[in-house]
Each structure stands twice: as C-alpha cells, then as structure tokens.
Amino acid sequence: MPQAIAFDPDAHDHPSRERLRHLLFAIFLACASAYFAWRLTVFNPDAPIYSTAFYISEFIGFTIGVLFNYIGLKCPIPAWKPAPPGLKVDVFVTTYNEPLDVVRSTLNGVRAMRYPHQAWLLDDGNRAEMAALAAEFGAKYLAREHNTGAKAGNLNNALKHATGDFIAVLDADHVPQADFLDRLLGYFDDTRLGFVQTPQDYSNPDAFQYTRDKFSPFILHDQSQFHYVGQPGRNAVDAAAFCGCSAVLRRAALDDVGGFPEETVTEDMHCAVRMQKKGHPGVFHREPLAFGIAPVRYREFLRQRLRWGQGNLQVCRAEGLPFSRSLSFGQQMSYLSLAWPYVGAVAKLCMYGAPPALLLSGVAPIISDPRVFAAFFLPLLISSLIVHDEIGRGYGNLLTSEHFLMAQLGSGLLALRGLFRRNLKFDVSSKLLHGGGDWLLLTPQAVVFAISAFAVGVGLFRYVDGVDGGELPPWLFAFAGGVACFNMYMVVKVASNVRRVSKVHENSYRHPVALPVTSGDALCETRWVSANAACLAGLPGTETPAIGTRLSLALHLPGGPLGVSGIFEKVDADAATVRFEWTTPADRDRLDLALRGSRWHRFVGRRRECNRSPYDVAFDLVVRGRLRRRDEEPMEPVLIETDHGWQAGYLGTLEVAGNTLPALVAFGPSAPKPGTLRIRSKAGESDIVIGKPVDGSAIADARALSVVYGNIYPVTSSN
C-alpha cells in the first residue's frame, strides 16, 4: 500500500493509486451498464414520455461523470527543464476598467520577475493615469481608440508592436511570482509546443467560488478540480486548455494561427483549439505562479461563468468541436468534456423537476420492486461517489459539484445561447472587493425550492391521508422526497453563500497572514494584513492603546523587516486595527508584493487547496490510527536571531515523508546554520537546535517557499 503524504498532489500519482483508480472506474462502468440496461425494462407504460425524459436526463448526467473520470484517470507530470538564458520575452498585461491599485499590484509583480523581459500595459480604457503608471514601472504603454475584438483585439494590437519570441499573458489583476518565467520557459525546448498554462489562482479566498470565509484552512474553489485534475489529465492527450492569462505562448505558433481569435468571447479556448489543429499542443504546469482577484459578488461570479459557457459553445460551433477530424480522439473527448456539461444543464433542470412531478402526480417514471431497484441503483450510487472522490484527488467531491451546479442553474441554461448566437458581448467581471445581496439572481433556485417544498408537503398529505395518489409505493415516495429535500438543501447552501459574500466590503484585501511585528522591544503578530492596514493580535501590556495613537512598527517579511508608521483606528479586547502611513510608494509595494506575489504564507498558515480523499482518510485511520494530523495547525510566527538582526521565521510541525516532525521555516539570504539558534516568540526568548535544511521535495507544497528563499529545518530539541 503506498504511503499517503499529506496534501501532496504527487502522492496521488503513485502507480498503485493509478491502478486503484482504473479498477474503481471499471467497477463504476460495470454498475452503470447494468443499471441503465435494467432501466430500459422498467419504464412506466402509462407515462412513456415522462419515463423517457427521465431516463435521458439520468443518462446525460452519467455521461458527464464518465467524461470527467476518463480525463482524470491519469494525470502525467510533464518533465520540467530550467529556462535557457537569452530568450526574448514580452509580457502583456491587459486592462480595460480595472482600478489603478489593481493594475499597480500586477505591474509591481511583473517588474519583480527575474527573467529578462519587456513589459507592456495594454489599456483598452485609454486612461492617462495608466500611461503614467506604465512609465513608473518601466512598461511600454499601448492604447486603442476603438475596442474592436475586446481582449483578443487588444492582444492582437500588441502583437503588431512586440518583437519577442514568447508572449506571457496576464490579466490586470493577476500578480506573477518572481520566478514565473523561469518556471515556464524551459518547456519550450519542445519545438512543437504552442503554450504553457498554469492554474488560475486567487489572492482572495473568501470570494463566492470558495464557499468559506478567508480564515478557513481549506481554499478549495469550484475550478480547483478542473485545474488540478482536468488540466493535468489533458496533458496525456495534448489537449491542455489555454485559460487566457497566467500563461506563456510561442509567438511563432500564434502567428501560425493568425493571432488571438476575435470571433468568440473566449479567445483563450479558441486559440488553443486552433493551435492544436495546427500541431502546436499546449502543456499544463500545475504549480500556481500568478494570483488574481476572484469575483466576490454572486452577480460577478455568474457573469464570468456565463461568458465562459457561451464562449466555449461558440468555439464548438465555429471549430466543429468536439468531433473535428483535425483532433485526436483524446482531444475530442477533452473538448466534449468542456462543452457537454452545458447541455447537461437542461438535463439537470429535468432532474430538479422530476421529484416534484412524481410527488404531485403520483405517477412514477419506473415500475419496479424496491429490492430490485436497490440492487441496481445502490451499487451505481456508491461506486460513483467513490470513484469521483478518488479521481478528484482531494480537489473536489460530488457535494461541491452539486452545490455549484445549483448555483449556476440559470447561467448554465443561458450559456446555451453560445450555440446559436455569433455576436456576444465580452463582459469583464468586477475586481472590486465589495459584496452585494444579488437576491433576485436566486430566482431559479427559489423556484426549485418552492416547488420542491410544495411537492413534499402535498405528497405527505396525500400519502398519510390515502387520498388520490396515496397509492404511490412508500419506498418511491421516500426516495423522491429525499431527493427533493436534498435539492432544497443545495438551494439553502447557495443562498447562504450569497449572504456570506454580501458582507464582504474591503477597499484593500485583508490577507489572513500572521506576520511577526515588533514595536520597540514588544512582539505581536498580525491577524490579517493589507497594503494599507493590519489587525494586531497579542499586544503586550495591560493598557489598551487609545484610538489615534501613533507608533512605529517593523513588519518582518521574508526579505527582511519593513518599517512603517501606524495609527490605531480600532481597539478591541484582544486585537487592534492599525492604519499604515507609508513614507514612499516603494514600501507599500514591497508589502503588497509579499502578500500577493507568492503563496509562501499559505504554506506556513497550513492553508491548502487540496483536501484528503477518502483513501487518505482511511489510510490515516487504519495505518496511523488517527483522523487529524498535527501538521494541519498553522505555524507560529517567530523571530530568529541572525548576524543581520532579527529575521522572520515560523515554528511548528510538518509532515515529512509520512512522519510529523517539529520544524522551523526560515528565509534567506541570511539563512541560519545547523546548531543552536536563538528565537523570540510571544512566550519570550528561547533556544532551539536545528539540523540541516530538509529536502523540500519530501514536503507537500514546499516549492511555495522557494520564491522567497525559504528553507525548512528540522528542530531536534528546544528549551
């Protein structure tokens, strides 16, 4: 049995796990084949149309699951190579109406990229302040008088001026890591390659797509499964999707397909299809290397997903997908898996309506003995749950999928317009960190809830009183009522998520990052920190600071301390909010880049996008005799005494090759040497003994530290 390494994507690709997934998929197919063959024999002869529609809806849902599982069976990791020197790279940052601070953060990250490049700010808003911002950060500025072709037209206009051999594309809100180009350019050693895509990652994990607040340790969102299972699976058949940003493209391949397609509102998918038809496949690099701003409001979430859905279906119509003869079978199945779920929205609507129809009419779509039904249905249900979770590799489950299917009920149906309409508007989702109720947009879900609740009530009355329709078999009544109640629960979950984001109102995002902070000799830590303010917890002393009190702070970042003046704005019993007063924009930019330009703070905060699959939970319980792991606790911020003064560090426990060990995270360039080390924490000063740095490959997600020169040291003793 392979060892389960906590939250490590590579652990899921152990050969025995791959064999297990193939076995589970085969069992799922066998159970489904038996069920759907049997279902053909139990149609209700008195309701043939109803029975047929229900069967077709079930079968469409099954095919969506088959496509997902087929794509995710094997997720090969492409061979990585370092970037060769001397490549000529242009970096395109596209903007239209995004706020100045949003674009500033991105240009700040672009300027910090280590590989030589030429930055371009492509402003379709034609704003003077953006021209000045580009000049400040050393980027070339391009604007157009007319926005023909939307984003694709903006990019094509830049291609007329740029001369690089490679094009990196970033949206206005996506801040790249310093090693963004270093990590991606080496793939182009394969002369066939058209582009390299990275996951879409976000800095605000309390947006609608996350379903949890910002302090949750789990930062899973509705696209996690696509990026960490679907995209790697597409690597196996040269069908990786280009997602429009956080990617690098070969200029020659772009020229070969005539640039970025302007005929559809998803120029990214369209560009990838044309490249693959021309023999320029893409590759997916599954390490997050740029961090954007996810739509906070439900309205903006739907607007973005609607554009994706309509655009994908537009591309299918324009390029003859999925069964274009210019694509391989694997590529055809990959594109079918992207388009078919939107057709499945109609089937899903039928599935939402089926339980109320059964309860209200008393007419069943099947006629069967309950024991026979259970013998065919339960194996299918159980096998589908197990195989979905295992192939999902901890990045999603059926409950999460059902949640977002319900959330996108209306937009999923509207997306079908992409099959019929050629001219669609390119809607840009808002980058503002302000929520809103958007309750009217829940009308489709409210209708599902109301009809389901009414049907359950009527069904109960008819069944208990034995009036007309009470002859419905008890098992079928219970089954239909249970499904209707589950659908109502999904509506409540979606409404709860809308309510949660309606309370989000921030001008500058408050990152849930614990930084060690000093003021004189006093040490505390941040509960959250933004580029403009911070919430300080663990303030020393017994006196509550007065509002308006000014103090000098040192924020201890991975690159060394950053001095700033602060004013107390809000004081509570256990924390205080301090507004920063920056002396130079460069200081603010440095803090902003530390928060938005990498994910090191997720590592020390033990915040993960990948959860444990049922296999991992079972392994921990049976083999290790535990359900919860100690390495799930956030590491404690401390200060480390070095020759250059006190430096930031984090002390806690980490999972190393299956063993939970005490560890210290320290940041270069003044890395500590093995031996006795003096540290400061909220408890005071103490000595610890550390060993040689641990090989990061043995620890899940340790590459998150490399961009800020972080190292992990085993702690052998402390006092």
Image: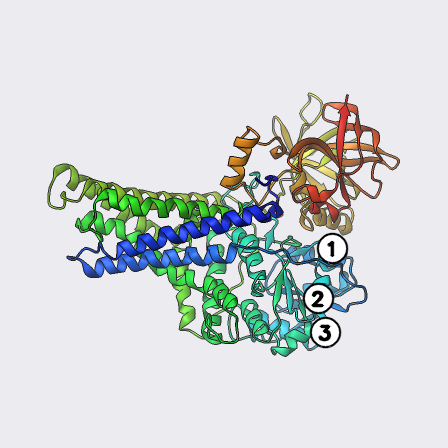
The CA span between labels 2 and 1 is 16 Å
Please state if 466 lies on the left or on the right of 514 as rendered: left
Residue 9 place in picture, x, y as percent? 60, 47
Vertical arrangement, residue 632 with respect to residue 432, above or below: above
Q: Which residue is mark 3?
A: 162
Please state if 324 lies on the left or on the right of 63 as rendered: right
Callout 2 environment at 10 Å: few (<14), some (14 to 19), or many (20+)?
many
Say what amino acid the circle numbered 3 marks: Ala
Please state if 388 lies on the left or on the right of 198 as rendered: left
- Mark nearer the N terminus (2 vs 1): 1
Q: Is residue 208 visible?
A: no
Callout 3 environment at 10 Å: few (<14), some (14 to 19), or many (20+)?
many
Q: Residue at horizontal 21%, vertical 61%?
A: 49
Say what amino acid the circle numbered 1 marks: Asp
Callout 1 environment at 10 Å: few (<14), some (14 to 19), or many (20+)?
some
The CA span between labels 3 and 1 is 22 Å
In the rendered image, the quadrant that contains the C terminus is: top right
Rendered image quadrant of residue 695: top right
Vertical arrangement, residue 72 with respect to residue 307, above or below: above
- Mark nearer the N terminus (2 vs 3): 3
Q: Which residue is mark 1?
A: 179
